[in-house]
Structure formats: structure tokens, C-alpha cells
Amino acid sequence: MVITYLHMKPFKKTKLEPTKRVCLAIKQARLAKGVSLEDLSKKTKINQEYLQALEECRFSDVDCAQIYQKNFIKKYVEALGLDASAYLEQFSDEELRFVPTKKQHGAPNCNKRYFSNLPQILRYVVVGAIVLTVSLYLGGQIKHTLEPPLLTLLSPDDGQIIYESGIAIRGYTEPEVKILINGETIVSDEYGNFSENVTLNPGINAVTIRAEKKHGKATEEVRHIIFKQTKSLTTAQLRKS
């Protein structure tokens, strides 16, 4: 029997380079694009702390269901102008393979403040404040238009007795309100103050004061004034006479 020995080349081990995890791959892509985390946060509207946690493979610190973490990866990569499909597939293989289905379909546990951008919130607050202020102003104007005007009489008193044929009607109302005394328009100043002399007839005089808005709402006050032409003599005056 002839034994033939085959000369075989010695087996050489080939060193395989480990594939970078998706977290390291996205960070490398960002650095290659020269984009800062701060700028990426503004562009994606994702909190910077979350983005940093993704780059450092701290997925548990991104307090959301994995399906939302995957969406973060997608936004991250697309914001760099890259195709996200390969990164998403790698993320699914590395991070979602051993995650229970219940975990993936659970409701997001993200605090909404991480999705908000502070300047954007401030804009909403300012716009809301402006809308509220305008609404209150318009509401006040409508209420003011529909309500009758204020009318306050300072003199005379109702039922007042006088011994002269004339008396001053004094009071105030709102600016730009028309004032009428017994149907005659009188002039008020820019603040709504008015004073007008009225001639009386002997006996009881009914004086009607009316404040009227442009849209027809009005307030009326009536004063009854008694004009006596002569004063009654007192007992002391009779004794002197």
C-alpha cells in the first residue's frame, strides 16, 4: 500500500472587523456631516438629551416604547440627508429582536416636554396671550355697546323746592354720549360732564334727563322740582312785621 501525503497549506485565521452598533453608526454619520447635536435637536424637534442617549447606546434612557425610539432614529438620519432604511434595519436587528411584542405596542411613556421646543412654546404662549387679549377687548366693546350708558345726576334732588325760576342740571355720563334735557340736546365735555340751566314754571316741574348712545341704548332720569314764587313767612318774620 502506498500512502501519499498531500501537502496542505496551513490554515490562516482571518480577523473579522466587528460591525459598529447602530448608535455608533449614526454618531459617525453626524460627525461626518459636521452637524452639532444642538442643531440636530432643533431640526428634528427631539430633545438633545435623547439624541445623545441614542448615540451612546443608552436606549433605556430614552423613556419611550421602542417603536418611538425607532422613529427617533429615522428622524435623526433623515435630518442628515441620508437614507434611513439600513439604519432602521440594523436597529431592529440589534435592539428589537429580543424585545417582547407587548413592549413595542405599548403606549409611549415619553414626557411631552422632550418633544417640545422652548422657543416654539414661547411663540404659542405669546400668540395665545394676544388672542386672549383681543377676545377680551372685543367682548368688552360689544358689552359696552349693548349696555345702556351710565348717567349720574349731581343736582338737583328729586322733589327739591326752589324759589327761583331757573336751576342748574348737573351730572356726568360716558364720553361721546348724547345728553338731552326735556328733549333738547345739550353739550357735555370730553369726559361726559354736563351742566345746563333750565327755566321753571310755577308749581311742579318734571325735568327728564336722557343719556343716549349712538346705537340707541339710553338711560333716563326724571327730577321733579317745585318752583314757589314767594317764600312763606316764618313766625319770627311775622312778629318783626
Image (cartoon, helix red, strand yellow):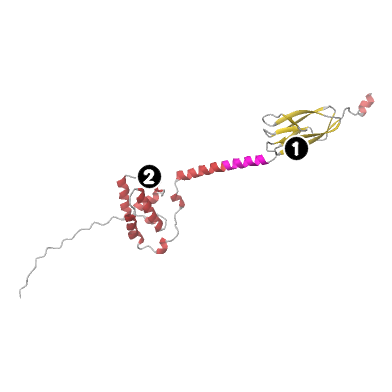
Residue 59: image location, x then y, percent:
37, 56
Snapshot quadrant of residue 68: bottom left
Location of mark 2 (residue): 39
- Secondary structure beneath dot 1 equals strand
Q: Toward the viewer: 71 or 232? A: 71
Residue 73: image location, x then y, percent:
36, 53
- Type of the residue with mark 1: Glu
Picture residue at 36% right of the left edge, 50% below the top: 78
Q: Is residue 22 left or right of residue 113?
A: left
Quadrant of the image for the N terminus? Answer: bottom left
Residue 204: image location, x then y, percent:
85, 33
- Secondary structure beneath dot 2 equals helix
Q: Residues within 10 Å of mark 2 (few under 14, many from 20)?
A: few
- Type of the residue with mark 2: Asp
Q: Is residue 95 left or right of residue 238?
A: left
Mark 1–mark 2 Cα distance, whole angstroms, equals 68 Å
Q: Residues within 10 Å of mark 1 (few under 14, many from 20)?
A: some
Magenta run includes residue 144: yes
Location of mark 1 (residue): 220
Magenta run includes residue 103: no
Q: Residue 94, labelled with which disc? A: none
Q: Which of the marked residues, 1 or 2, is nearer the chain's N terminus?
A: 2
Camera-nearest label, 1 or 2: 1
In this rendering, the answer to whether 98 lies above or below 171 is below
Residue 227: image location, x then y, percent:
85, 30
Snapshot quadrant of residue 88: bottom left
- Specify the segment rendered in magenta: 134-146
Q: Toward the viewer: 203 or 4? A: 203
